Amino acid sequence: MYLWKAWQDSRTRVVVYILAALCVGGLSGLQVVSYANYHLQQMATPPRWLARLSWNFYMLITFEALGAWVIPYAKVAALLAGLSLGASGVGGEYGAGTMPFVLTRPAPRRNLLFTDWAIGLTAIVIVVGSLAFCVFPFLCYARAQGPGNVLIALPGLWVWAAAIYGLASFTTLVAGSASKGLVLSAAVVLTYGFLPDALHSWWHVEALLKARDWTLQIFNGGWDVFFNGASVQFHWGAIAFWLAVAAGFLGASVAWIQYREL
Amino acid sequence: MNDLAIHTGGLQKFFEKTHAVDGLDLNVPRGAVYAFLGRNGAGKTTTIKTLLGLVRPTGGSAQVLGYDIGRDLIAILERTGFVPENKTLFDSLTPAQMVRFNQGYFPKWSRERVACYADLFEIPMDTRFARLSLGNKTKVCHLLALCQGADLLILDEPTAGLDPVMTDLLLRVLVEDHVSEGKTVFLSSHQITEVERIADWVGIIEKGRILLETRLEEIRKNYRLVRAAAGSPPAVSSPDLVAAQRMDNFWSYLVSRGAEEFAAMLSAKGITILEISPVSLGEVFLGLTRKEVPCISGKPGKIPVPA
Amino acid sequence: MLLHLNTSSGVPVYLQIEGQVKQAVAAGALPPGTALPSVRRMAAEMRVNPNTVAKAYQNLEREGVIRTVPGGGTYVADTNPGLLKSEKVRRLRPIAQQLAVESFQVRLAPADVMKLVEDELDGLGGKR
């Protein structure tokens, strides 16, 4: 039924993203290992084989290091996957003219959205997750330590991606076509990114900037952890915020599709 | 109303600038083939959309197969096959995939019918929808609705885009597989001659209201065209006079009943009666909805409701 | 059994069906006892509403042209000479009307019209 159809529409995209994520993740892993090797070369005196046994080396190739590289990529991957998968949802049926057919199938309208979201969110979890997890082979090879911040950062990334997905899905629904939805959601994301800074620079309004940075704590755990040895935390508040945003978009989409006439 | 497949009571749908449906009272008996006729913009499509829950009425009530459109829409959709005016389906799927998609929704889906119709209508089942011609797209829409096991079929412009052979086949299939089994067919079409063959009820909508709703039998039995020759415009009025048309000294009057009496009345005024002939549904429709040309005098009377 | 439907003639469909069945019976194409197609099949073949066919069959049965067997099936009844005559008269009336109109046009006296018809009938000879 609709689940199958939604999967048909998305599957090429999802497969491409997973492959891309695997490539990016793999490259990140290589990057981590080569960085460690580079640092080794800087440590002049002890012979290499001895240096490899020292805890310094292991500290370099930890999951923390992985975090430094992977999280920025994961952020971009989450953004792109969220926007793209969200825009290819039910909303596109309006533009395609197939909505009268879809809405006259004997099923509650909200099921359309639940189906869409089920597929979209599963895809996002896989794409973002695969980016992080595919570097594990490299780290096992380098005998890295501890589970580290990647696993802790993942829930935050997932929830943020879900919120982006919700945004794109809702804007596509309201705008009636995938392209308009994408443009609108990209605009919202950029506004969210730049407006608080602009307000701060021009009008010295700090509140918005602080609020935004608080929500973006989920992306902490990159370089500052790596260089300063700060411990990575699970930012419950920010995660709850993005979860609420995602749920809000789902609720708004359901209300909209029930209300909208053709 | 258990014996009516569709019933509306004072149905209204107002948009910002127009009253698309303005007090519509529709009564479609179960098992009937109901021809829903009207000019473009008369409110046909809005009415159909309201019956299927695509549009919410501003006022009035409507029941389909005994279920209220506000409360039990899903029950209605389970039992109603719909062919929309715009024959668009999912571009990326093939008809075979569309069948797979659709059959999951309907427990009474018939695979035998799918095979039979796909063959009969010559539908290319493995070509993606985007690449199909309009005729084939229309056929696929019909396929999906006809195999559902529906109790009611709502068809909006079903023959638009079909070639004469396919139209003929469609009529046959409707009669044999649906009407003969007691299912109701609600047809909205501009092809009045084709619809007239299989219909037994007709409803004419104009400006959001029903102008005439009657059995086709009534029209055949009672509606007549009285053609007369008169030198000067005759002063005639009758509650049964539906429309009058003039060409030079010749007049034709469409009466809804009592044609003989009407002709006698004209004769009494010295007007020569040329012929009293039966009329087709198309002529009745035109008579009722044709734009009045200013030179016609003899105002059409109020349309009587047949007993 | 093939019937031809003329939708633009103004003659109601059920009357056309009745007329054509009666013609076929009269011409001997449907001998008594022949089975007629079911209402459903006839309606499908002709692309008309089954109620119309049902009505025609009902009328034909009432007039004794066909009979239905309990348990299904419709068959041509045994020939009824009285019925056939009324059918013949009915069939010829439009032609007679046309002849009357044409005679009026050319102003041929009624007596001459009758003579004309008799001559034609005599010409047919022993075919009656």
Image: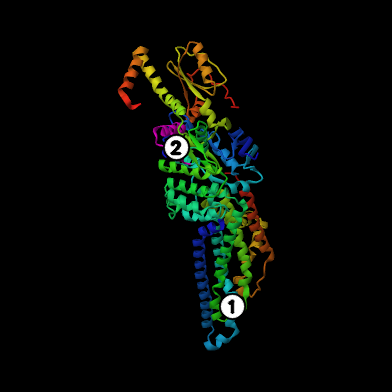
Q: Is residue B12 left or right of residue B223?
A: right
Labels 2 and 1 in the same subunit: no
Q: Position of residue C49 (x, y in %)?
A: 50, 37
On screen, A73 above or below B282? below
Quarter of the image that includes the N terminus of chain B: top right
Residue at image position (51%, 18%) is B260
Q: Amino acid at mark 1?
A: Thr
Please name which of the two marks, 2 or 1, marks the residue nearer to the observer.
2
Query: Residue under mark 2: which chain is it in?
Result: C
Amino acid type at circle 2 is Pro
Question: In the rendered structure, which segment of residues is drawn in magenta?
Answer: C16-37
Identify the mark at residue A41; answer none if there is no mark: none
**Viewer-side residue, B164 vs B86:** B164
Q: Is residue A101 magenta?
A: no
Q: Are marks 2 and 1 in contact (CB under 8 Å)?
A: no
| x then y, percent, for residue A33 | 52, 78
**Which mark is on residue A62?**
1
Colouring? rainbow
Nearer to me, B98 or A87: B98
Q: Label 2, on which residue?
A: C32
**Percent of width and height locating residue C112:** 34, 13
Residue that sits furthest to the right in the current view: A237
Q: Quadrant of residue B300?
A: top right
Chain identifier of the residue bearing label 1 in the image: A
